[in-house]
Amino acid sequence: MPKNEFTSFDVTAVVKELKSLVLDSRVNNIYQFDQKTIVFKLHKSNMPSIRLVVESGRRIHSTVYAEESPAEPPAFCMMLRHYLRDSWFDSIEQYEFERIVILGFRTKTGLLRLAVELFGDGNLILINPDGIIIQALFFKKMRDRNILHGEKFQFPPSTGKNPLTISKLDLQTVFETSKDVEVVRVLARSVGLGGTYAEEILLRAGVEKNVLCKILAPADIAKIFDVLQTLLSNVFEGKFDPRIIVSSDDETAYLDVTPFNLQRHAEGCLFKGFQTFSEALDEFFLKVKTAEKALASVEVDKLQSEQKRIKRMIADQEAALAGEEAKSERDKTVGNTIYAHFNEFEMFLNKLVTANQRGAEWSNIFTQILTDKKAGKSPEIYVEGIDTKNLVVNFFVDDLHFGLNLRLSIFDNANEYYERGKRSKQKSAGTVVALADSKRKLAKLERDLAEAEHIRSLKPAEMLEAMAKRKVETKDWYEKFRYFTTSEGFLVVAGKDVVTNEILIKKYTRQEDVVFHAEITGSPFVVIKAEGRQITDQALKEAGEYAAAFCRAWRENVGSADIYWVKVDQLSKSGPSGESVPHGAFFVIGKRNWMRNTTLKTAIGIEINETQACFIGGSIDAVRAKAKSYVVIVPGDHQGKDLLKMILKTLTLKLSKEDKEKLGKTSIEQIREYIPYTKGTINQKPT
């Protein structure tokens, strides 16, 4: 059976690797792809983005695969974003030799820790600086500890001796107290090594794994202890040779993944080597997860049944809502009708009440009314019938059938209908909420069903191929900044903040390049990369337009801004009197080349080739030259997701069915980086 979870040795190895990778990185964002899987997107200077995957109860490692994010992040993911986004990765440690990793984050509120439990069902537990639980993936009460909000976090009790601190004498004592137990079981449980490494140690020590502890000789115990120390030394010193063990019968069947070579795999096994243990883990668990998805596709029938049930529920709720709304409207109309004929009703009912007060029985009064009706002597208001038991006179007026209670005044009768209408309205409001909830459930269910049906239609090889397409390629240096390519092919790169402004000018700008800036505080540096070419007037125009769009004037809804450009040698980190310039800023020496009153505008479009489609942004001329469909954005009051949805809808309306298929499932978040301050409006005027 293929490996399905980490061993303690795996945890030690991957933590050692990850320290140099993730420490002092910034948490850009956090995603949750299923109930147990979290991915941290990390930024570190002069490195491509790092993606750290954490799956409760199973694994932790870096990954190069970017799964599709859910439309609405789960509540646990939103909580992690609230506390940890924009924090700094401070530490990563294994707790003793357990399958527990503690991640430390420097935040504005202090050092927060995330306990990652990689045993059993696992858990992810966020802990404040005082050791109190803020939130957990799973809250639970247990015999030996509780994972509850507001309680002190406690590590689970150890199930055996710590291999890191065990002495030869301790090991001997463990074996002596476990006389009639097999040695492999004692190493796996009482020493906490797990089955794989218990067998590996015994194999290297030349001790039969099923031998009883009471039969072990002192020399055997000494060999076992020495082999244990050697393995621990290898893992702590980083002597890794990462590999995936594959079946000798089928090289696509993965059996195990280890940080170094194990003798138990020496015979009859093939392997694939990797540069890092994280790379091996990433590939191994990609196949494990793919296989699980294939098995999960058997849930299609269950999902289809649930889909039918919810659809029936929605139909019933819609019918109930329509009925309540119609009843509410009718009762309101009856109340209005009573007031419209108020005097007529009052005169007629007064006649009836007066006759009763003069001694006439209600039954006789009603009989007389019906007799007059049959004789054609109808009163001013058409009487339809009489309920003698409840003293209600039924009328048919203005195409409405309704009754008036003789025990109530005309005013009270009208008010009673109004109150009925209000109650129906309130009842329909509750139905609206329930209906909206049902529709949300149906939408999620249909997404799950579509994915399950798609998975069932694929073969495992095709599923792996689909996942491989989500592999994140190593980015070029300029992809950590904002950038676009002009209509003439010049690369234009812009800073995102003071840090990237500083890096862009100091590290990536050459003497032949041109640097733009807006005459307003809070603007990015924008650089045209010459790369051996003569920079043209058209390139200057497009870069100036880009610099204007991303300056602070856009946020203030200003229509234009003054932009200037200079050569690189005109920028200095020292002012005229030697005073220092703030981080991310530079002092300009000499003449500035002005582009006065540059209109604030930018474009976003969809570029399409034979196999795929993608979003592009930049100056209008640059986007127009490449895009199949594009829109121009100017400063305005639309913002956030509403603006992004508006842009996506406008762009896709211009595409053919074939081109829409190339674009595939698209997240509006892919558009955000092209829109200054995620604020503006679509320019409807021709450009």
Image (cartoon, helix red, strand yellow):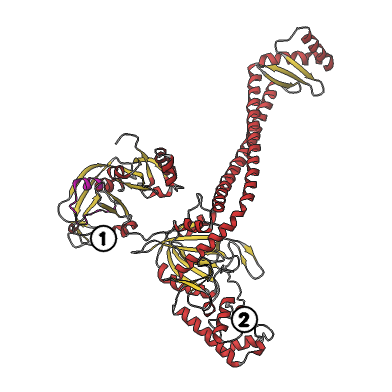
Read off the residue under disc 2: 184
Residue type of the residue flagged with mark 2: Val
Place residue 584 in its image quadrant: bottom left
Work out whether residue 554 or residue 529 is closer to the camera in this orientation and state it. Answer: 529
- Density class for disc 2 (Cα within 10 Å; few <14, some 14-19, many ≥20) is many
Are the residues at dot 1 and dot 2 in contact (C-beta closer than 8 Å)?
no
Residue 606 versus residue 338 in the image, above or below: below
- For residue 104, side relative to residue 413 (left or right): left
| Of pointers 1 and 2, the one earlier in the residue sequence | 2
Please count the marks in the image.
2
* Residue at the outermost bottom position: 218
> Does the magenta segment cover residue 528?
yes
Place residue 140 in its image quadrant: bottom right
Determine whether the residue tagged by mark 2 lies in a helix, strand or loop: helix
Read off the residue under disc 1: 508
Residue type of the residue flagged with mark 1: Tyr
Quarter of the image for the C terminus: give it.
top left
Residue 301 is situated, as x and y percent measured from the top left of the image, at: 63, 49
Residue 242 is situated, as x and y percent measured from the top left of the image, at: 46, 73
Identify the magenta region: 524-542
